[in-house]
Amino acid sequence: MSFSRMVSLGSRLAMVCICGSIWVSGTGCASADRVQQLETLNRNLNAEKTELQQELYDLRIGSQSHRERLESLQGQLSTKDMLIANLQSENDGLEDKFSKLQRIAENIADRPPGPVLGNTKALPAALDAALQQFAAAHPDAIAYDPSNGALKWKSDLLFALGSDIVKQSARESLQAFSTIMNSEAARDFDLIVVGHTDNIRISQAATKAKHPTNMHLSVHRSIAAQQVLREYGVPAERVGVTGFGEYRPIAPNDTDQNRMRNRRVEMYIVPHGLFGSSPASAMAITGRDDTVK
């Protein structure tokens, strides 16, 4: 209720009270009809007075309700302002963390590709010769670097785009490589399988459901290659897996040809026991517990 409205009602109520008093006080010398008229008028004035008093009371109650409502809304607004400030602070913190992680990822991507692991022990001549002969037999699919005991498979020849299922056509080379790893010449060496991808983000829903990121895809492909090697007799405790996603390119991801080069699976032949020789150590590398229970 506005202040002017309350003043108006108060004035009307005061006028009714005054008029009632005047009329009542003036009934002493009036005739019977006049007295009856004055009594009727007095009753009417009293009724209007009561009505105005009730209306004034209702308006006061309404005004109090409006004030309480206003205070409540002001409290809610203050709470919302605090919530917005807190959310803004959290958002600033998340943006700062994202920026730091992005810088870390960029730093990783800018590092020289290089091998994941370098050999501390030269490969035996027989093993080196077998690997060179193996790579020469698959020149379009495999490259061998004798300086660090690394073999590089082109992912597009091992897997369909966005898939971690080894192509049937690639199994022949993996079987031949398994024969080398199971030979006497390789008995003192283990194998680390490393997956890499290009920098194209996974977008298809079906693929993303299985491989949420390129990092997932690179590791899943390493695991798939390891499983095929196991099928061909290479013990699980001799094969570890890892992946670098798009963060270790060997060429700029600026053309289809370069991106194809970056999609690769590397296998590093390393000295046996480099990661420990116990079953527990093997499980830490492979992610599986193949001990007999």
Image (cartoon, rainbow, N blue to C red):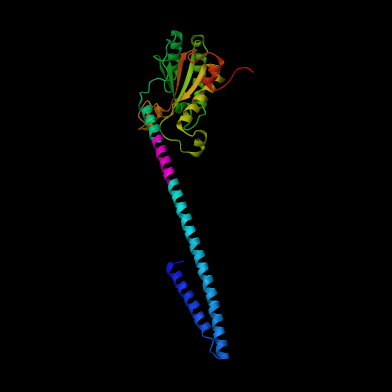
Does the magenta-highlighted stretch encompass residue 88?
yes
* Residue at the image point whose x is 46% and y is 11% from the top: 127
Q: Is residue 4 above or below residue 76?
A: below
**Count of numbered tags:** 0
Residue 169 position, x and y percent, is: 50, 25
228 left or right, relative to 245: right
Residue 265 position, x and y percent, is: 45, 24
The chief SS type of the magenta part is helix
**Residue 107 figure quarter:** top left
Which is more toward the observer, 39 or 116?
39
Does the magenta-highlighted stretch encompass residue 92?
yes
The residue range painted magenta reads 84-97
- Regarding residue 233, the answer to whether it shows in the image is no
Residue 139 position, x and y percent, is: 42, 20
Q: Is residue 1 above or below residue 29?
A: above
Which is more toward the observer, 74 or 28?
28
* Residue at the image point whose x is 50% and y is 67% from the top: 59
* Residue at the image point whose x is 46% and y is 20% from the top: 267
Residue 171 position, x and y percent, is: 51, 23
Residue projecting furthest to the front: 28
Which is more toward the observer, 93 or 71?
71
Q: What is the quadrant of the C terminus in the image?
A: top right
278 left or right, relative to 8: right
Q: Is residue 191 above or below residue 164?
A: above
- Regarding residue 124, the answer to whether it shows in the image is yes
Residue projecting furthest to the right: 293
